[in-house]
Image: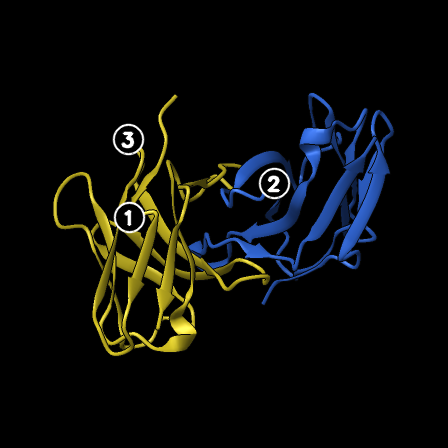
Amino acid sequence: EPEVTQTPSHQVTQMGQEVILRCVPISNHLYFYWYRQILGQKVEFLVSFYNNEISEKSEIFDDQFSVERPDGSNFTLKIRSTKLEDSAMYFCASSPAMQEAWYEQYFGPGTRLTVT
Amino acid sequence: AQKITQTQPGMFVQEKEAVTLDCTYDTSDPSYGLFWYKQPSSGEMIFLIYQGSYDQQNATEGRYSLNFQKARKSANLVISASQLGDSAMYFCATRVLTGGGNKLTFGTGTQLKVEL
């Protein structure tokens, strides 16, 4: 069964460093998302991406964050200058259609980012 | 804005018993979907079940069923014949179609522990 993959599974970085989290969505999906989950808290939406542009973003997704689809398979989240409060699990998700409300979003296994 | 409320931070159930996890939502959009996800200790997000706002019947998927009461804005998850492997965090989420929006909004989750 097709699945969303994410690399790395765990990333440790120093405060102020740039990190890039990578995702490979399911191949025929058109919509891509990033969510984050601070330890012990709920999952929060960051950004959605369609047709090579951001379709929606939350207030968390400030100028320090950016997303890109550099080729036909990868979808990346970049954090320019990491802060301690960026430490969280970051989930990538993809879905085949936007207008069908019942389409689930398929989540990847997550990347745990630890900022020291 | 959508809001999901899960009032049970933790629940215990005995193996083979049924358990209901509560979820209420708040949205003014007439067209929306309700989702339940399971998050085991390993961290991945596993889709369990979906209910559309216009669906006449309650959704069922194997041992999972969704008790949808639209007028009360509740979408409780019922797990029948609980198994030890059901021990996990369970998140309720909603998705609306207002303005083409497709993000999932999650509740704070319920930690379920299945006991022998």
The local crowd at label 2, few if under 14, some if 14 to 19, many if 20 or more residues have their Cα within 10 Å, is: many
Task: Find chain B in the image and tell me its colour.
Answer: blue
**Closer to viewer: mark 2 or mark 1:** 1
Q: Quadrant of the N terminus of chain B?
A: bottom right
**Closer to viewer: mark 1 or mark 3:** 1
Q: Which residue is mark 1?
A: A8
Q: Which is more N-terminal, label 3 or label 1?
A: 1
Q: How far is the residue under mark 2 from the one under mark 1?
A: 22 Å
> Residue sitting at 69 percent across and 33 percent down?
B86
Rendered yellow, the chain in question is: A
Q: Secondary structure at mark 1?
A: loop
Please indicate whether residue A108 sits to the left or right of residue B17 in the image.
Answer: left
Q: Looking at the picture, which amino acid does disc 2 mark? A: Lys
> Residue sitting at 47 percent across and 55 percent down?
B103
Residue B17 visible from this viewpoint: yes
- Judging from the image, mark 3 belongs to the subunit labelled A
